[in-house]
Image (cartoon, grey):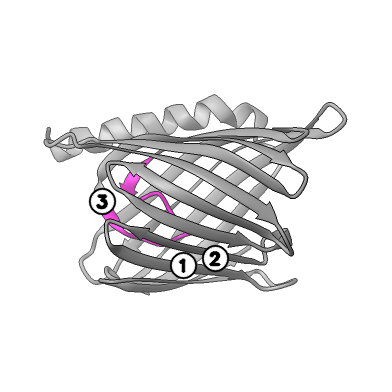
């Protein structure tokens, strides 16, 4: 498949994602400038997101939105992008979410960690149930490469989680790859931590939001590369 046709296909799918969710996602807008350094050298770009929250019943709520970013690498003059549309519903102790995405970087871990990939489209879904401070759930991801190879990847992730000064989650990764994961999310998303061991490869990512400041700091480390970035919101 020619590169221009791949680009048109991805742009069309991204447009479809936006149209399916934008009607309920116009109440909130955020713009930011990601600036970072990683395997692709120095990168700068622009991020956009829209999200709305609606009450559902007495104890539930629904989040619907779109978001993504476009960055440019100074080292090899390459452009990277990732966009998604998502919906999350919480009803009492049961929750579920669905996300449709497309781009030419891997699905971000926590935030803008840029890892080049073949142009692709995919979906991520999750179902969870809580029993007080303890809960369990099942997440899944499927991704199809829009290239000559057309590689298909998938993963199924059962997990348990508990709340203690934040949300701790321990998961098992099954599917195209095998591994384990642990994540932590502090209340109000001030600190997020993700550690995974997949196919004997260890990765660690941390995200820090500064109180009352329009900055988010992130750092990631794998066996082969390291990344740091700053996102300035305006």
**Mark closest to the chain's N terminus, 2 or 3:** 3
Q: Is mark 3 on a helix, strand or loop?
A: strand
**Circle 3 is placed at which residue position?**
117
Horizontal side of 60 relative to 161 (left or right) equals right
* Sequence-first disc among 1 and 2: 2
- Note whether 90 is above or below 67 in the view shown: above
Asked if marks 1 and 2 touch (Cβ < 8 Å), the reply is yes
- Residue nearer the viewer, 215 or 149: 149
Please report contact status of discs 2 and 3: CB closer than 8 Å, yes or no: no
Residue density around tag 3, few if under 14, some if 14–19, many if 20 or more, within 10 Å: few
The image position of residue 100, as x and y in percent, is 45, 34
Left/right placement of residue 158 relative to residue 10 reads right
**Magenta stretch bounds:** 102-116
Q: Give the residue at x 88% y 30%.
A: 58
Asked where in the image residue 6 lies, by quadrant, the reply is top left
Label 1 and label 2: CA atoms lie apart by 6 Å
Q: In which quarter of the image is residue 141?
A: top left
Q: In the rendered image, which quarter contains the N terminus?
A: top left
C-alpha distance separating marks 1 and 3:
19 Å
Q: Which residue is drawn at 29% across and 47% down?
A: 177
Which residue matches tag 2?
Answer: 193
Circle 1: is it few (<14), some (14-19), or many (20+) Cα within 10 Å? many
Disc 2 element? strand
Q: Residues within 10 Å of mark 2 (few under 14, many from 20)?
A: many
Q: Quick one: 42 or 169, which is closer to the camera?
A: 169
Residue on which the image places disc 1: 205
Q: For residue 99: magenta?
A: no
Distance Cα–Cα, label 2 vs label 3: 23 Å
């Amino acid at each position: 498949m020619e590169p221009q046709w791949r680009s048109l296909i991805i742009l069309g799918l991204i447009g479809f994602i936006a149209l399916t969710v934008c009607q309920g996602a116009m109440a909130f807008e955020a713009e930011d400038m990601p600036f970072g350094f990683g395997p692709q050298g120095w990168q700068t770009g622009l991020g956009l997101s829209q999200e709305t929250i609606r009450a559902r019943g007495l104890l539930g709520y629904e989040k619907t939105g779109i978001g993504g970013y476009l960055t440019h690498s100074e080292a090899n003059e390459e452009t990277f992008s990732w966009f998604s549309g998502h919906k999350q519903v919480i009803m009492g102790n049961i929750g579920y979410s669905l996300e449709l995405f497309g781009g030419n970087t891997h699905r971000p871990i926590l935030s803008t960690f840029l890892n080049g990939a073949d142009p692709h489209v995919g979906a991520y879904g999750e179902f969870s149930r809580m029993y007080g401070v303890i809960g369990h759930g099942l997440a899944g991801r499927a991704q199809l490469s829009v290239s000559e190879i057309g590689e298909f990847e998938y993963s199924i992730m059962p997990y348990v989680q508990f709340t203690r000064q934040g949300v701790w989650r321990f998961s098992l990764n099954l599917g195209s790859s095998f591994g384990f994961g642990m994540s932590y999310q502090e209340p109000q998303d001030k600190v997020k931590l993700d550690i995974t061991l997949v196919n004997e490869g260890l990765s660690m990512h941390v995200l820090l939001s500064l109180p009352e400041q329009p900055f988010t700091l992130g750092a990631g480390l794998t066996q082969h590369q390291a990344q740091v970035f700053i996102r300035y919101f305006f």
